[in-house]
Image (cartoon, rainbow, N blue to C red):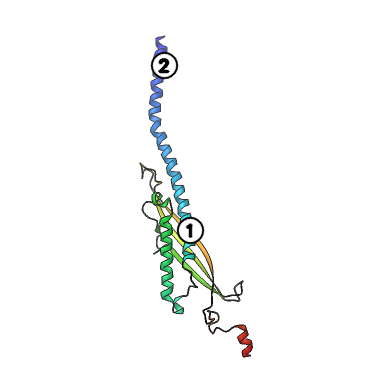
């Protein structure tokens, strides 16, 4: 009888010691799962924010076609680029989740001065499917977010990850003629009827 009681007591104390040893490991495992989930969420939020910023930057500042410096419109082109950059920053700043998932504010990708890159290509009336002169504007955004999974109150326990979000949007701009009827494809403002009367 005494041996059985002793064995039961030893068995109970062994179970308690095992539980005490496993508790920190279980807590660490739960924190690691939380860190991995939050890091994945940060990656998704960064990608979505970059796409939203690209759409906003492409649509915000297109009062008319973007003319390059060769057309003598470098000042207007620079203002459009600045407005696109400000719009992208505003969208990224308003995106919920980036404020606590990212360490600090989202930043442009390494080697880039800003978030937005815009490239324009002119299409003549013959190249366009609508029969009118158009301009294709491709706006891309590159966003970098450094996160540690936001596993408070033990932030920094599992290290940090650097996430890169990329977004792109294509806008097709119709080159609307000025009041005198001039467009980049028709600098004289002549219509087909005018050409017929002249001949």
Across and down, in percent, residue 69 comes to: 44, 77
Query: Label 2, on which residue?
Result: 8
Q: Residues within 10 Å of mark 2 (few under 14, many from 20)?
A: few
Distance, label 2 to label 1, CA atoms, is: 64 Å
Across and down, in percent, residue 57 comes to: 46, 64
User: Horizontal placement of 46 versus 129: left or right?
Assistant: left
Q: Quadrant of the C terminus?
A: bottom right
Q: Nearer the viewer, residue 163 or 54?
A: 54
What residue sits 39% from the left and 14% below the top? 6
What residue sits 40% from the left and 27% below the top? 19
What residue sits 44% from the left and 50% below the top? 42
Across and down, in percent, residue 190 comes to: 57, 84
Of the residues under marks 2 and 1, which one precedes in the sequence? 2
Q: Quadrant of the N terminus?
A: top left
Callouts 2 and 1 close, C-beta under 8 Å: no
Quarter where residue 93 is shown: bottom left
Q: Nearer the viewer, residue 124 or 160?
A: 124
Task: Pick out the residue farthest to the bottom.
Answer: 199
Q: How many marks?
A: 2
Query: Label 1, on which residue?
Result: 52
Across and down, in percent, residue 124 comes to: 57, 76
Quarter where residue 12 is shown: top left
Q: Residues within 10 Å of mark 1 (few under 14, many from 20)?
A: many
Identify the secondary structure beneath mark 2. Answer: helix
Q: Is residue 85 above or below residue 160?
A: below
Q: Nearer the viewer, residue 7 or 199?
A: 199
Identify the secondary structure beneath mark 1. Answer: helix
What residue sits 62% from the left and 83% below the top? 192
Task: Pick out the residue farthest to the top.
Answer: 1
């Amino acid at each position: 009888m005494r041996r059985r009681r002793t064995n039961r007591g030893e068995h109970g104390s062994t179970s308690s010691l095992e539980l005490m040893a496993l508790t920190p490991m279980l807590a660490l495992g739960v924190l690691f799962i939380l860190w991995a989930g939050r890091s994945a969420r940060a990656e998704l939020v960064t990608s979505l924010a970059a796409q939203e910023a690209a759409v906003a930057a492409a649509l915000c500042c297109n009062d008319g076609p973007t003319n390059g410096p060769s057309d003598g419109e470098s000042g207007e082109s620079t203002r459009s680029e600045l407005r696109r950059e400000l719009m992208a920053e505003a969208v990224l700043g308003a995106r919920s989740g980036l404020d606590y998932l990212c360490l600090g504010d989202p930043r442009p990708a390494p080697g880039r001065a800003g978030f937005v890159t815009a490239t324009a290509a002119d299409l003549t009336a013959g190249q366009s499917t609508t029969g009118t002169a158009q301009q294709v504007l491709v706006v891309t955004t590159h966003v970098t977010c450094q996160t540690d999974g936001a596993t408070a109150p033990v932030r920094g326990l599992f290290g940090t990850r650097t996430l890169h979000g990329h977004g792109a949007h294509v806008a097709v701009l119709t080159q609307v003629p000025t009041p005198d009827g001039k467009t980049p494809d028709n600098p004289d403002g002549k219509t087909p009827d005018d050409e017929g009367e002249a001949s």
